[in-house]
Image (cartoon, helix red, strand yellow):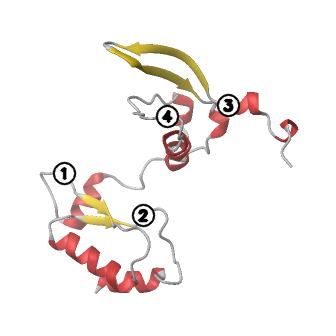
Amino acid sequence: VWTDGLTSLDRYKGRCYHIEPVAGEETQFIAYVAYPLDLFEEGSVTNMFTSIVGNVFGFKALRALRLEDLRIPVAYVKTFQGPPHGIQVERDKLNKYGRPLLGCTIKPKLGLSAKNYGRAVYECLRGGLDFTKDDENVNSQPFMRWRDRFLFCAE
């Protein structure tokens, strides 16, 4: 049973603090929205982006939406520890210098067997990508266990 007493909605809701029309577009607006920092896990870029981008972009009442800017308070930025090492270490491991590193997420994210996932990784790397990554929904499902996926990718 849902009641207003279960959550402090006023304390945790996002607030639109300014709206301005887009020049020359009578049905388009720029909305400035602020969220309380208590909504976000300290040091988690993933949590912050999932909370802001994932939920808002799934709001069906909006016909179109574009994120144009994101301002992160210094107090929250200071909770990020940063990467364990810099880009130079990654470049040294891959022996790739003088250009951006190029990677992708394997799609479809779900439904491939471990063997076909490994084949997709191989084709991406053979085609010139420097790395691939798992989609956040890919863990160790019965049809594609992590260890099997790893072994086929390493092969």
Whether residue 132 is situated above or below residue 120 in the rendered picture: above
Q: Where's residue 153, x and y in %? A: 32, 80
Residue under the point 34% across and 86% down: 115
N-term mark: 1 or 3: 3
Label 1 belongs to which residue?
100
Tell me if label 1 and label 2 are in contact, CB under 8 Å: no
- How many other residues sit within 10 Å of disc 2, few (<14), some (14-19) or many (≥20)? some
Query: Contact (CB < 8 A) between labels 2 and 3?
Result: no
Q: Nearer the viewer, mark 1 or mark 4?
A: 4
Comparing 56 with 26, the one in front is 26
- The Cα–Cα distance between marks 3 and 4, rounded to whole angstroms, is 18 Å
Position of 62 with respect to 96 (left or right) is right
How far apart are the two marked residues, 2 and 3, measured between alpha carbons? Answer: 29 Å
Query: Which of the two discs, 2 and 4, sits closer to the camera?
Result: 4
In the image, residue 68 sits, relative to residue 83, either above or below, namely above
Say which residue label 3 marks: 13
In the image, taking residue 79 as reference, residue 121 lies left or right, namely: left
Instruction: Choose the circle earlier in sequence order: 1 or 4.
Output: 4
Q: Which residue is mark 2?
A: 135
